[in-house]
Image (cartoon, coloured by chain):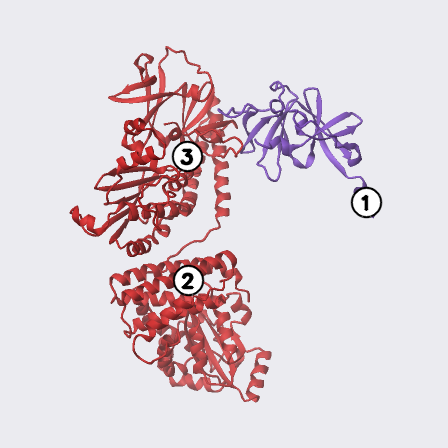
């Protein structure tokens, strides 16, 4: 059986488990005695090891195995958690992450054995004083289970001779003649197991080391095709004892249980007779798994025993799972499929738009047509929404790695600090979430390194010794806002001014004439860093400019607010969706243009007499605010069709605190538009963010009001 | 066998013959995705003059290039014969080029193509990869790579 087809799932799940481990170990650091956390860590480590083993990644398996040993000792109370151990564990997690990354790139785990970490892990184990060698992973649970064995053994047989094919019966007889011992084994996989067939395959492999599988129910073919519920039964011919076999089976991860008994066609009814009460208790259950019990006579009740035993199992298991939240039900959808769905929706909207324009141009509009349009409109809107929802994922997947990062930085810089996060459940388009991780990381590092002062300085200023960094995400209309805030020293604008002068970016006069917000924007220029020292973390001047370009590539914007001595807030504003937007359609010089509605504040009717000139720029005074005027006909290189003395239509656009009035010739109205790329040949124009296709097939350009302000 | 021999000796390439001004040009048919009639072109501000704008080709927005302007000739005069040829080359995004008219498809064997030396400094010659000799006259074969270079 080929496991490569499971590589994707393996990678996804490994990352998930690693994330869980990181979070849990962080919790453990805060609360070293928490048994739930320890249990959770142990389970995650165990699963990770099993998965690595399944996929044949031996080095990764070895490392996780040793890590699991440490957790196992901690869980049993033989080892106490301490700071040194946490550090080693984190390094170990990083190493495992390294494996996962390499596997993701090359499908191979590479050849780094991570000996030093393994040695440290073993030192921890040895350090507990006892001479007891590291117990094999998975042995603990296996032993516990083994203790229950005698009680179950007699009931485990799920077979009778009638079920076996001729070949199987023949093999059985041969094995008996060869003086092999025959066992019947029922294996139960965990309910949330994703790769049942892969697990079953591992069980087969484990068994083959001891003996031969003679028969399987369902058939081996069905098992490989995953055509079984949670359990399958096997008849094994082996030379040795049963217990080691069961132990080995249970060592396979995600196997909930394995029960077995000596197989003997005649012995089965006897075992059943020994437990008549139990049999009656659960009479109702087994029909679904074994569809033809009526035809079998004596052995039939025995057959029911196997599922029944499982029925008795869950309470214990549920208890074990106690602290762990329910498995996250996720739908993995190929992004390409989603994109094509997205395109279909685009087409649908174009079709709708053409219907709309057809209806408005036709004066003898029948109500029927309008009903159809209404219907089409509601369908497309719903479709759009639901497709968008499929694409939305919570930003949690990105931000959950940050507490760990801040902890490491805190240690590295010897600066106590805490990260407080809120709004992790805020959802964003998948493509945006994938891209937002790096910029956020840069900003957090920036806050941790430059923003927060050293503890002595903080105490001197009367601030709490430990610095605080806040990461808040929330939805605001059609935008998602992510704020990175610290209570550090804020940005020293005078130092930035000096730096700008030193670098020759500004003359002295310019620097002192510029207001603080312009000065702060300098920080977003490439290779502009005010850090006195280049540290490992930041200060190389690559960072904020990367942040800015990344965010702008996602059609978002970054804003900084700072107060010297009190802290800095970076605000990232991202559009919820990228492909379909609400736009205001306008006409300039006879040409149609779209302006994204999200950037528009109001539309004003302005008398040309009210236009004033300040510093040779046209402005209007709108209810007390002075707003610069931008004549779109000049910017778009076309001729306005309006007479100079006519009243002007001014679209007031806003970008953060700034506003501008865009002068247009005519308003058409609001429309849902599909953004199309214009290709790289022709996108040299900064304030045109794309094009859209109108109902009549005409192409209209989309004006990016943010780029104009 | 015979077939193989003939193609080896005399490779045949199909060209679409177009007219720009008084001259005939040939475009290798394998690069041509589509030929559409003149339609409304949406002007794009602040782009070089040889870009006429963008059109809607079955839901995709495609830039349109004026070959005349690119070659240093007078701007296009759109007539009923004017066509937009949609070119798709491996390394380039689809692009439309405006031509005065599309005449025919010709088969030119390699023996009929002369790789003449051109004055690459001349705007028009810079875009030629060879001259095809056909019964309808001489056809300048367009070097599309050169046309798209530096767009």
Q: Are marks 1 and 3 on the same chain?
A: no
Q: Residues within 10 Å of mark 2 (few under 14, many from 20)?
A: many
For the residues marked 1 and 2, what is the alpha-carbon distance in whole angstroms? 60 Å
Circle number at residue A581: 3
Q: Residues within 10 Å of mark 3 (few under 14, many from 20)?
A: some
Q: Is residue A385 left or right of residue A30?
A: right
The chain that appears purple in the image is B
Circle number at residue A96: 2
Of residues A164 and A256, the one nearer the viewer is A256
Question: Which circle, 1 or 2, is nearer the viewer?
Answer: 2
Q: How many marks?
A: 3
**Dots 2, 3 in contact, CB < 8 A:** no
Q: Position of residue A246 (x, y in %)?
A: 44, 78
Q: Is residue A504 left or right of residue A287?
A: left
Q: Position of residue A668 (x, y in %)?
A: 42, 23
Q: Element type at marker 2?
A: helix
Q: Element type at marker 3?
A: strand
- Pointer 1 chain: B
Residue reaching furthest to the front: A502
Task: Inspect this view and state whether residue A503 appears.
Answer: yes
Q: Dividing the picture into quarters, in which one does residue A30 lie?
A: bottom left
Residue under pointer 1: B3
Residue reaching furthest to the right: B2
Colour of the chain lettered A: red
Question: Which circle, 2 or 3, is nearer the viewer?
Answer: 2
Q: Residues within 10 Å of mark 1 (few under 14, many from 20)?
A: few
Of residues A523 and A426, the one nearer the viewer is A523
């Amino acid at each position: 059986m080929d496991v490569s087809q499971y590589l994707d799932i393996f990678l996804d799940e490994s990352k998930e488990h690693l994330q869980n481990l990181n979070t849990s170990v962080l919790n453990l650091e805060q609360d070293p005695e928490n048994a739930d956390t320890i249990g959770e860590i142990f389970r995650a480590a165990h699963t990770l090891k099993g998965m690595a083993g399944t996929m044949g990644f031996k080095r990764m398996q070895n490392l996780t195995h040793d890590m699991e040993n440490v957790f196992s000792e901690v869980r049993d109370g033989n080892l106490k958690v301490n700071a040194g151990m946490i550090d080693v564990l984190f390094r170990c997690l990083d190493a495992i992450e390294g494996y996962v990354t390499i596997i993701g790139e090359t499908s191979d785990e590479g050849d780094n054995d991570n000996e030093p970490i393994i040695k440290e892990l073993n030192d921890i184990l040895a350090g507990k004083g006892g001479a007891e060698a590291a117990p094999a992973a998975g042995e603990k649970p296996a032993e516990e289970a083994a203790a229950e064995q005698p009680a179950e053994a007699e009931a485990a047989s799920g077979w009778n001779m009638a079920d076996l094919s001729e070949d199987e019966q023949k093999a059985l007889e041969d094995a008996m003649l060869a003086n092999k011992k025959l066992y019947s084994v029922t294996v139960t996989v965990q309910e949330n197991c994703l790769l049942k067939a892969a697990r079953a395959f591992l069980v087969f492999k484990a068994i083959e080391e001891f003996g031969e599988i003679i028969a399987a129910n369902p058939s081996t073919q069905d098992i490989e095709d995953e055509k079984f519920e949670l359990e399958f039964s096997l008849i094994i011919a082996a030379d040795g004892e049963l217990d080691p076999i069961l132990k080995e089976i249970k060592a396979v991860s995600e196997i909930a249980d394995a029960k077995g008994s000596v197989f003997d066609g005649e012995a089965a009814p006897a075992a059943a007779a020994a437990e008549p009460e139990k049999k009656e208790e659960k009479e109702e259950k087994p029909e679904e798994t074994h569809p033809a019990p009526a035809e079998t006579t004596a052995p039939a009740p025995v057959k029911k025993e196997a599922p029944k035993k499982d029925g008795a199992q869950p309470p214990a298991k549920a208890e074990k799972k106690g602290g762990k939240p329910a498995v996250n039900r996720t739908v993995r959808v190929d992004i390409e499929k989603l994109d094509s769905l997205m395109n279909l929706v685009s087409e649908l909207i174009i079709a709708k738009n053409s219907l709309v324009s057809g209806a408005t141009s036709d004066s003898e509009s029948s109500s029927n047509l309008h009903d159809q349009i209404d219907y089409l409109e509601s369908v497309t809107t719903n479709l759009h929404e639901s497709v968008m929802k499929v694409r939305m994922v919570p930003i949690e997947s990105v931000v959950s790695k940050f507490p760990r990062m801040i902890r490491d930085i805190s240690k590295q810089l010897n600066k106590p600090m805490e990260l407080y996060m809120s709004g992790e459940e805020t959802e964003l388009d998948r493509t945006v979430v994938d891209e937002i991780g790096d910029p956020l990381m840069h900003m957090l590092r920036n806050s941790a390194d430059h923003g927060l002062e050293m503890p002595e300085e903080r105490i001197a200023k009367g601030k709490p010794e430990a610095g605080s960094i806040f990461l808040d995400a929330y939805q605001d209309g059609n935008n998602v806002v992510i704020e990175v805030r610290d209570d550090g020293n804020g940005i020293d604008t005078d130092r930035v001014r000096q730096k700008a002068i030193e670098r020759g970016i500004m003359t002295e006069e310019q620097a002192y004439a510029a207001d603080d917000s312009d000065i702060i924007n300098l920080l977003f220029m490439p290779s502009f860093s005010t850090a006195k020292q280049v540290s490992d973390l930041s200060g190389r001047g690559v960072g904020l400019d990367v942040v800015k370009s990344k965010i702008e590539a996602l059609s978002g914007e970054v804003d900084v607010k700072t107060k010297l001595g009190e802290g800095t807030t970076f605000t990232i504003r991202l559009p919820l969706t990228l492909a379909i937007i609400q736009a205001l359609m306008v006409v300039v010089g006879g040409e149609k243009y779209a302006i994204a509605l999200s950037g528009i504040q109001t539309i004003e009717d302005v008398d040309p007499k009210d236009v004033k000139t300040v510093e040779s720029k046209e402005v209007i005074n709108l209810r007390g605010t002075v707003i610069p005027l931008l004549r779109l006909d000049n910017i778009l290189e076309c001729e306005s069709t309006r007479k100079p003395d006519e009243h002007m239509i001014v679209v007031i656009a806003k970008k953060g605190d700034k506003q501008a009035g865009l002068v247009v010739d005519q308003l058409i109205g609001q429309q849902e538009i599909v953004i199309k790329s214009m290709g790289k040949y022709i996108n040299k124009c900064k304030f045109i963010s794309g094009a859209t296709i109108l109902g009549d097939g005409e192409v209209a350009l989309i004006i990016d009001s943010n780029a104009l302000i | 066998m015979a077939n193989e021999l003939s193609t080896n000796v005399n490779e045949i390439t199909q060209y679409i013959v177009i007219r720009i001004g008084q001259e005939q040009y040939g475009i290798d048919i394998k690069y041509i995705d589509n030929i559409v009639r003149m339609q409304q072109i949406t002007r794009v501000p602040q782009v070089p003059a040889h870009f006429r704008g963008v059109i809607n080709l079955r839901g995709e927005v495609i830039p349109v290039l004026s070959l005349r302007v690119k070659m240093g000739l007078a701007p296009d005069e759109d007539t009923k014969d004017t066509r937009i040829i949609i070119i798709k080359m491996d390394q380039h995004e689809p692009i439309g080029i405006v031509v005065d008219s599309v005449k025919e498809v010709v088969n030119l064997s390699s023996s009929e193509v002369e790789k003449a030396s051109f004055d690459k400094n001349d705007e028009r010659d810079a875009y030629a990869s060879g001259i095809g000799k056909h019964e309808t006259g001489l056809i300048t074969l367009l070097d599309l790579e050169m046309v798209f270079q530096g767009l």
